Structure formats: structure tokens, C-alpha cells
């Protein structure tokens, strides 16, 4: 079956969801290489606040370190505020909404067209996260086995040092997966009922990505 041409250009409002470590950041970076849209990651935004020691950053740290979700009111205010700057662009939200109240608050500001759900088994995820390294400045993500940096410990582009996330410790990963089960799974049902959920299952990003790519080609023109 050929790929359907995209519909006339409306502004795409998309969300990427999936358990911690399912590849939201990795798939998002591939999406950005192929399609002209803005990417807003709640986790990257929180880590940026944390680094700058803003009020939100200080509050967020205790929750992130415990593998728990930041309270809905703080998170929603932070994200909706950032979204105001993106109203002229196609956008993709990564890591938000993560609870039904967050999804409801988002619905009050715009209509979500598409929710890309990365359905990756928990066992696969636990192995991945212990091998993850990130570049804090840009949010670029590496994995010692899957996509290692060109030089050990250094970002490919800036050559700055890579760090491990504090919340990638095995016991915190377990708590994050539990929070996902309890609080984020209901968000999938919420979007399923609205008819906008598109699930992509697999254990490898390289098998999931071609499906996501083909799906997005039906929504947006590809950049050359
Ligand atoms: P985050 O930052 O949103 P998570 O927990 O949702 O964190 P995370 O950990 O960022 O998600 P990801 O983006 O889904 O994972 O995955 P990734 O980084 O692309 O890939 C994970 C690793 O696997 C990488 O090393 C990558 O290279 C590797 N990898 C990818 N594909 C493959 C593959 O095919 N094979 C192999 N071997 N490796 C691969 O949120 C952090 C915290 O912030 C708070 C919460 O406290 C949360 O715990 N928070 C919120 N709280 C409330 N509400 C919200 N909306 C919140 N958003 C964030
Ligand atoms: Mg991420």
C-alpha cells in the first residue's frame, strides 16, 4: 500500500507517549530530522529548570529523584506556558501529558490530532536505561550499545562531557515504571476513546521508527 499524501497544511498537534526509556527522545530526534516541527520534552524542560535552580527546578528535583511524577498543577502551568511560544508551528510533545488531569488541561487549550504510543516491554527498558548517557545542554541521548558517542564520554557535536541521569538508577527506574502503570496508562485509554491513539509495538527503535515515519508521512510533508 502506498503512502497517502498529507492533507492540506493545518498545524499538527502531536504527542509521543510511552514508558520511561521506551525511546520517546530517540524517536523524536528522528522525527525532527524528517519533519519540520517543534519538539517540547517535559523531562528536558524540568532538567533545564533543575540545572538553573529555578523554583520549579528545586521542587521538581525531589519528585524526579524518587521516580515520582511532578504535581499536575506545576507541570501543566510549566508546559502550557512554553506552548504559548509555539502556537505558529507544528509541534510534538514528549512526556506530557502523563496523567488524565494533564490531558484534560491540554484539551482546554487545543485539540490533539495524534498520539504516538511507543509500546515497548518493561524488561527491554530496564536494560536500556542503565546504559544511557545524555548531553545535558541539548538533551541529546546516547546508549553505550545502541548509539554510542563517537568518543567515549563526549557529546558528538559540542564535545562537552556526557552525564548519566540520577533517575536511571535501577531502583528509581522500577518506581518510574510503576508510576507509568498507575498514572499514564489511563491517558492511553483517554486518547483511545477520542480516536487519536496510534500504537507502535516492538523491542527496538529501528523496527518501530519505519512505522512511525510512514504514519507521519500521511500527516506532514517531509523536509528535503
Ligand atoms: P522524562 O525525562 O520524560 P521518561 O521517564 O518518560 O523521562 P525517558 O527516560 O526520557 O522517559 P525516553 O525518552 O522514552 O525515556 O527514551 P530515550 O531516552 O529515547 O531512550 C532510552 C535509552 O534507550 C537511551 O539510552 C537510548 O539511546 C536507548 N535506546 C533507544 N532505542 C533503543 C534500542 O532500540 N535499543 C537499545 N539497546 N537502546 C535503545 O521524565 C523524567 C521525570 O520527570 C518528571 C517525572 O518525575 C519523570 O520521572 N516528569 C513529569 N512529571 C509529571 N508530569 C509530567 N508530564 C512529567 N514529565 C516528566
Ligand atoms: Mg526522554
Image (cartoon, rainbow, N blue to C red):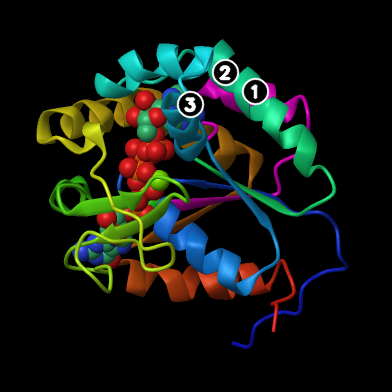
The image's mark for residue 101 is 2
Query: Does residue 85 appear left or right of residue 222 in this picture?
Result: right
Among numbered discs 3 and 1, the one appearing first in the sequence: 3
Of the pair 45 and 68, the residue shown nearer to us: 45
Is disc 2 in contact with disc 1, using a CB cutoff of under 8 Å?
yes
CA–CA distance in space, label 3 to label 1: 29 Å
Name which residue lies at 17% across and 67% down.
145
Q: Does the magenta stretch include residue 107?
A: yes
Dot 3 corresponds to which residue? 52
CA–CA distance in space, label 2 to label 3: 27 Å
- Badge 1 density bin: few <14, some 14–19, many ≥20, Cα 10 Å: few
Q: Does the magenta stretch include residue 79?
A: no
Furthest toward the bottom, the residue is 2
Image vertical order of residue 163 relative to residue 84, above or below: below
Span highlighted in magenta in the image:
96-117
The image's mark for residue 104 is 1
Image vertical order of residue 193 relative to residue 7, above or below: above
Where residue 149 appears, x then y in whole percent?
Answer: 27, 68
- Badge 2 density bin: few <14, some 14–19, many ≥20, Cα 10 Å: some
Element type at mark 2:
helix
Amino acid at each position: 500500500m502506498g503512502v497517502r499524501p498529507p492533507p492540506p497544511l493545518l498545524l499538527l498537534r502531536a504527542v509521543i507517549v510511552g514508558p520511561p526509556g521506551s525511546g520517546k527522545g530517540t524517536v523524536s530526534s528522528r522525527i525532527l530530522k524528517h519533519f519540520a516541527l517543534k519538539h517540547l520534552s517535559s523531562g528536558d524542560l524540568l532538567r533545564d529548570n533543575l540545572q538553573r535552580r529555578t523554583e520549579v527546578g528545586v521542587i521538581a528535583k525531589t519528585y524526579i529523584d524518587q521516580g515520582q511524577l511532578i504535581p499536575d498543577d506545576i507541570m501543566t502551568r510549566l508546559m502550557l506556558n512554553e506552548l504559548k511560544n509555539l502556537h505558529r508551528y507544528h509541534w510534538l510533545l514528549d512526556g506530557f501529558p502523563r496523567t488524565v488531569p494533564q490531558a484534560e488541561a491540554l484539551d482546554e487549550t487545543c485539540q490533539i490530532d495524534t498520539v504516538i504510543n511507543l509500546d515497548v516491554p518493561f524488561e527491554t527498558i530496564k536494560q536500556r536505561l542503565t546504559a544511557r548517557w545524555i548531553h545535558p545542554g541539548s538533551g541529546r541521548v546516547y546508549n553505550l550499545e545502541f548509539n554510542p558517542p563517537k568518543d567515549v564520554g563526549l557529546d558528538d557535536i559540542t564535545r562537552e562531557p556526557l552525564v548519566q541521569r540520577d533517575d536511571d538508577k535501577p531502583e528509581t527506574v522500577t518506581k518510574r515504571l510503576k508510576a507509568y502503570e498507575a498514572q499514564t496508562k489511563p491517558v492511553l485509554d483517554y486518547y483511545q476513546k477520542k480516536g487519536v491513539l496510534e500504537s507502535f509495538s516492538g523491542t527496538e527503535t529501528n523496527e518501530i521508527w519505519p512505522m512511525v515515519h510512514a504514519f507521519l508521512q500521511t500527516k506532514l510533508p517531509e523536509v528535503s
